[in-house]
Each structure stands twice: as C-alpha cells, then as structure tokens.
Amino acid sequence: MSFELETARADAGNLRRVAIDPVSRVEGHGKVTLLIDDNDEIQQVRLHIVEFRGFEKFIQGRPYWEVPVMVQRLCGICPVSHHLAASKAFDHVVGAPVLTPTAAVVRRLMHYGQMLQSHALHFFHLSSPDLLFGFASDVGRRNIVGVAAAYPEIAKQGVLLRKYGQEVIRHTAGKRIHGTGAIPGGVNRSLTVDERDELLAGIDQMIAWSREAVVMVKRLHATDPVLYDDFGTFRSNLLSIVRDDGALDFYDGVLRARDADGGILLDGVEAKDYHQWIGEEVKPWSYMKFPFLKHLGTEAGWYKVGPLARVQNCDFIPSPLAEAERREFIDYGKGQLIHAPLAYHWARMIEMLYAAETIKTLLQTDDLLGGDLVREGAHQPEGVGIIEAPRGTLIHHYAVGDDDLVTMCNLIVSTTHNNQPMNEAVRRVARQYLNGRKLTEGLLNHIEVAIRAFDPCLSCATHALGKMPLQVVLQDRAGSELDRLEKTGAGEISGRRE
Amino acid sequence: MDAMDAVAVKPKVRVATTSLAGCFGCHMSFLDIDERLLELVELVEFDRSPLTDIKHCGPCDIGLIEGGVCNSENVHVLREFRKNCKVLIAIGACAINGGLPALRNSFDIGRCLQEVYLTGLNVENGQVPNDPELPLPLDQVHPIHEVVRIDYFIPGCPPSGDAIWKFLTDLLAGRTPRLGHPLLRFD
Ligand code: SF4
C-alpha cells in the first residue's frame, strides 16, 4: 500500500533530492528525504529510520531473567518503559500475573516518574524552542540554551521537573538510567521512609509547575489557533490501553481503538491477544515497520498512539486537576476528535500533570514501604506485556523454553505505531508550507516541528539492506581492513566472515 | 545579557555531541547534571548535538561520542567528528566496546534481517528494507577506537551525570580529568 506523496509518480531521476539528516531535537536516528521537481513542487516525502539493531534476534538464547535489564538498552530515554513491559511479560512466564501490593505500587511509581521526566524533557528541552521562538527562528538560538537565555524561569522548571522524575526512578529502580528495580514476578526493593519523605517534600511544587506548563501550552494555542489547529493535521484512528473502567492508565489496561470520528473500533482486548488485532507492514525504505489494525487492512487500519490518542481514548482521568484539563481539552474539539499534531503538546502536558498528581497519591500509599516483594507460580511458556510508554503503546512478547532461555521475541515500540502518522504529518506540512517555494533552513525545520510533535523515539524504533550493488569497507587507522560488507544487485549480502 | 557579555570577554568552549549505535542513555545521563546544565552553558556552546539543529559538526574543542559503529553512516559521522574536534571522548560502554548492540556480532546479519522483516510474527508484505537511502549496516558492531583515535574514555552504561560533570569540569579547568573510585562504574 502506498500513500499520497509516499512515492514519486514518474521519472524520479529528474527530481532534486533534499535531505534533513539527521532529524534533530528528537531521540534516535532518522532522516527525511524530499524529492522535488523543476517547479519546486514536492513529489515525494519520506521519514526513514536508518538504523538496524536486530534485538529480536540476539535476545534469543538469553536466560529470561536477564531480559528486563537488557531491553532497556534499546532506549535510554524511556528505559523504564522497556524494563517494565518486559517485566510484565515475564510476570506471566513465572506464573505471577498479579503482584504483591508493594511490588505493584513500586513499579507504578517508577513508571509515573518516567512519564513525568520524559514529558518534561520532550516539551522543555526539545520542543519548546520551536514553540517559543517560532519554527523558522534563528537556528543558533533554537535550542534549550536559547530558551535558558530568553526564558530562564521556564528552562529551570523544565530541568527541575525532569530531575524530579529521574529521582523517582532512582529511588524505585536503583539508578536513574538503566536501573534494575523490576524483576519477573515483582521488584527487588521498596522505598525507605527517608526516600519517600524526600520525594514527598518536592511533589507539590512539581504539581504546580505541571499546571503552569498546561497553561503555557493553552496560551500558545490561543495566540495562533489557526497554526496550532491546521499545522500538518490529518485524520486517523487512535489506539491506547485504558483501565477496565475506561480511565486513563499508563501502567496497565486493555486495548481500545477509536476511528477518526471517535467511534469504538475495538475495546477490552487483552494484552495476550494483541497479535490477533495488530499486523505490521514492511516497506523497503525504512527499518521501522508500519503497524495497522488487521480487520481494517493496511490502508485504513493505521492509527495514532501517544498523548493525543490516550487523552481522547479514555473516558476520564482519575486525578482531579488533570481531569479538569482533559475536559477543557475535549471541549476545545467542539464534539470532534482533535487530530492536530501540535495538540500533542497540550495533551502531553495534561498527562504530565496527571503523572505528578498520581506520584503524590502513590507516595502516600503505605504499601510503598512494604517488604513482600516477589511472587512466583506455575511457569508458562509465553508472556505478553503492554504498557503506555511516554510515546504510546509499547508491546513486548516473549516465549521461553523449558531451559529458561528465550526462544522468541516480538516488540512493537511506541514510535513504530506512529510511523504512518509521522509520515502523513510531514507530507501535509510539505504540501502546506514547502510546495513551490525555495527551501530554506527555516522551512525545512517545519518538517521537523511536525515530527517532534509526536515525540518520536527513533532510538527505540531502529530495527537495513539493498538491491544496489554496494560495498562498505571499514579500515583501522593503519589502513588494514576490519570489516567489509557487500551487497549484490540481487540484494544478497555477504560479509567478511562468510 | 550576562551570558552575552561573558562571550565578549572569554570565548566559550565549543562542544559537539552525537549518538552512533547507542540508545541515547549517555546523552540522557549528560542531562542528569540537572541544574548544572544552566551553569555549563555559561562556559560552553553546543555545536552539532541532538539538542541543537546544527546538522554537521564544525571546528570544536570537545567532541563526545555515544554508541559504537554499526553502519556506514556511523563511520562518516565519526570521521567528521575526529576531523573537527580537538579532543574526542568515547562516552559509555557502546562507544568503548560496542555495548549491547554488539550482541548481534555472534549472528549473521542477513539472518537477523530476515528474522525481523520476513519471518517475524504478524509481518505483512515481508521484505528486507533495501532502499539506497538506508545506510548499509556493517556485519559487526565496532568500538569507535577501531576507526579513529580517541583521547579519553568514560566507562559506564551510562556513566552517571556526576561522572560526566566531573570529567568535563576537569577538562574545562585545564586539569587532567580523573573520575576517582566512586564515580568510576561499569554498569
Ligand atoms: S553505553 Fe549504555 S547508556 Fe550509553 S548508549 Fe550504550 S546502552 Fe545506552
């Protein structure tokens, strides 16, 4: 299946190629290529994910208990999401799908700390320069350092919100990045009274700053509604998990999808059944696959995930301040779903507020200090773990042999779900802003602004080879060959070791 | 404006950073210096980095490399950094020895690709991506010192924010950077 502007119609040989490489102020490795004809009309736009990791392969043969710690190295921005999605999958493998109350609350706290830090990082460190200075503002200033100079208070709040989230992670996972707190069947630590009190002392300030952040995004929308509503906007389905009662929940729930008008497409789907509903299409020009709802097919079945999907997919947010903000957000849509990519920022800040409020509630739970940490039951050969990561629905699926070694691994990471939406958004922006014009740095940044709205984590999504005869030789400084890879015209690959 | 005045007095140290085959965790750990980031930007300015929109590295004082070398593009970027940076630092396990991505070195890359894109669960329209826009993967993931000369190595996965801060402030003050026992970690 090919979408409008995905593939240039004719004689691509006469088209001019412009590349945005690398896409910056996003996490991970990606590039955008544009093919443009003699009249400056855009003929093709693609967001490529250019790195291949092969994680699903090399995880096979590892003992299952290593996996929750290994998988974090897929992504250093949301390591906790991978840590927990894998742990949740292995909870089933070790026969402990229901955790002890202490383990459940420690994991949840870890996850909400991660949501807070990741949303703060994305908004303040990565996206705010575009929103505060303008999409085509001076490239030398368009970064967090520029924000710190022009709006020191905003930059400071961003840094401290992120810091707080990282501290929550450190106290629950043992380490800010790539911790080890969750294990199959539970956790390996709970909080001490001192650790809890330290976090409690800071939380009200975080809630207050999160509220201010929502107000700031609303103000941005209000100053230029046309831009914020129309920029790269396209309609699509939405997917996320929701709690059994329809509440927003980042840690656990059932799959729900809506169509572009808000009608329910599927609901109540349990994690273990995800593969009956979600398929993944491969395209030759990206290492990132294109997921879709199987019953709708590749053309109609793709969907958005992440804050914009979650906030509109749930029935309510179970914390008062964030719920009030959700209602205001829904009202802004006047009965229609909001599909504007820039509205992701608004939804994301509502979620940050929800995360901060939830952290406070969790810190007040006595179970957090308990000592009963792990459960184990009859082992099962397979497990699926689904969680709402900062960027959207994250699925980990493993099979384990009788010898405790992993035999199968399938991951669908959040950013992969958003592959088609991001491509769609950049094609819209290309049509809206770039068509027929002389391309400048500022115009090209418009493309990146659209990508950034999704907060893509291309690091997670990197899962490459070709039909062109191509050869790469890696030499050391003395000129001797270290590595060589050849690709024949037929697409066969041969390496030095073969 | 203070910061601007300082520029006039003393030129800032130019720092470039990039992630090759890494997970961005080392960059995140850099941000874990927290409020000290606001102090740091008084002393340094960023060239190419995931935090700025500068796409190619210009002449710099310090370059920080996260991640090993897994494809042809990594090799180009690494050479660009070596050419432009007076001091080049390998940060984290992946840059130093390949790290977790190097686990794929014991498998044949062709087979890895087939497994992920052809025979994997629920794959539709299975094929191995092969567009010329995709950089060619190397059949092994390599440490960066196999490709260019590296001046310093900071171990850890990732090194802590404190370790990165200590290292950089030593370097900026003209001292030989030393982590010392508490900051030197390999996990
Ligand atoms: S060393 Fe660790 S934290 Fe750094 S890029 Fe590699 S896996 Fe990520």
Image (cartoon, rainbow, N blue to C red):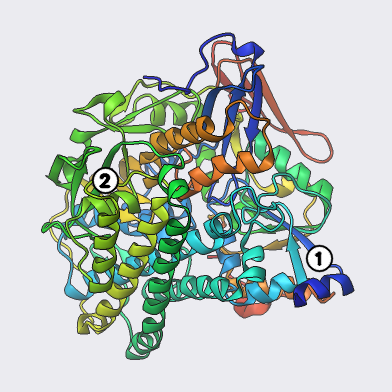
Q: Is residue B108 left or right of residue A437?
A: left
Q: Subunit of mark 1? A: B
Task: Look at 16% across and 60% down and name the residue there.
Answer: A96
Question: In terms of image quarters, where does ligand 1 lie?
Answer: bottom right
Q: Quadrant of the C terminus of chain A?
A: top right
Q: Are marks 2 and 1 in contact (CB under 8 Å)?
A: no
Q: Eyeballing the image, is A420 above or below A104?
A: above
x and y, in percent, of residue B158 in the image: 56, 63
As helix, strand or loop, the secondary structure at mark 1 comes to strand
Kindly identify the amino acid type of the residue bearing the numbered disc 1: Val
The amino acid type of the residue labelled 2 equals Leu
Q: Nearer the viewer, residue A324 or B9?
A: A324
Query: Could you give the CA–CA distance between mark 2 and mark 1, rounded to whole angstroms?
Result: 48 Å
Q: From the viewer's perspective, tell me whether residue A173 is left or right of residue A107.
A: right
Q: Is residue B146 visible?
A: yes
Q: Which residue is mark 2?
A: A337
Q: Which of the pair A156/A118 is nearer the observer?
A: A156
Measured along the vertical axis of the image, is residue A344 above or below residue B167?
above
Residue B61 x %, y % = 82, 60
Indicate left or right for A237 with A147 as reference.
Answer: left
- Comparing marks 2 and 1, which lies closer to the viewer? 2
Name the residue that disc number 1 marks: B13
- For label 1, the crowd category at 10 Å Cα-Cα, with few meaning under 14, some 14 to 19 and many 20 or more, is some
Which is nearer the eye, A99 or A264?
A: A264
- In the image, residue A225 lies at what x, y percent? 43, 51
Is disc 2 placed on a helix, strand or loop? Answer: loop
Residue at point 42% right, 26% down?
A: B114
Q: Does the Cβ of the disc 2 residue fall within 8 Å of ligand 1?
A: no
